[in-house]
Image (cartoon, rainbow, N blue to C red):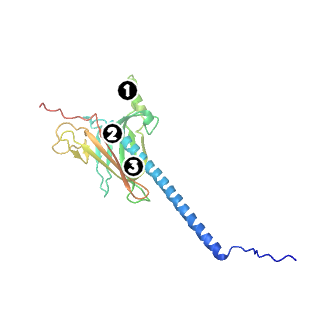
Amino acid sequence: MTPPSDTTQRGFTLLEIMVATAILGLVLTAIYGVLSRALYAKNHAEERADLYAAGRETVLKMADELEGALPPNPQGTIFFIGATGNDRVPTDAVQFDVVIRREFSGAKSRGGRTRVQYSLDPLKDTPNLYALRRQEELLTDPALDNASGDDPGSAEDEAPPPVASAAYLIDRVAGLRLRYLDPQTGEWTDSWDTSNPPPGYQGPASLPGAIEITLFLADAQGGVHDFGTIVDLPLAVLPTPRPG
């Protein structure tokens, strides 16, 4: 007869399975934590990059248009108005005239002298945040200005009404602050109105010598980031320097 074997087959006990499961859970939790933090950091970096790109692009667009602002004329049909907001955060607005080429006009089919306004509109579902609104109103059409003089009344008869359009450039705006350099005193002021010069102002109404733009944007975590620049207005009437 063959003697019975001493080798016995045995499986895992319940305690061993529970210990292995616990160790596996700890390993998977650690891996998930690492991947989750890496994914959060990636999304946060992309969001921050998009926010900074949008902020810089918006400020440069405003600066580019303000640089071409037309100086006021004696007839009062061209003016420049920069007003301060009344809210707790800076909600300034600016309105000016500029010549826009057809391909950059909101109407896309006409260009010419246009009145542009930048202002902030509150967001409905997000308190204390705004959307930057750009509105343009076409005032003159070069095609009509260059019309033949044989029939001066024909251009007026065919002149269409002013074309107005508005669009939001960026949302999650926490504030907009504009300051204006007085070319006579060399000091910065919070508002500028060529249709109503300040008391004691000498000389004809003029554009400010420069404009300081500061745009505040809020990120998804509630942080506020500012984007700013200073743009010179080459068409401003600067005072004649006195001889030394």
SS of the residue under disc 2? helix
- Badge 1 is on which residue? 152
Q: Which mark is residue 132?
A: 3
Residue shown at 37% from the left, 51% from the top: 120
Mark 3 belongs to which amino acid? Leu
In the figure, is residue 71 to the left or right of 172? left
Q: How many marks?
A: 3
- Badge 2 is on which residue? 66
Pointer 2 with pointer 1, Cβ within 8 A: no
Residue shown at 37% from the left, 44% from the top: 59
Position above or below: 82 against 148: below
**Residue 185 location (% of width, % of height):** 18, 41
| Mark 3 or 1: the one toward you | 3
Residue 111 versus residue 26: which sits nearer the camera? 26
Outermost top residue: 150
CA–CA distance in space, label 2 to label 1: 33 Å
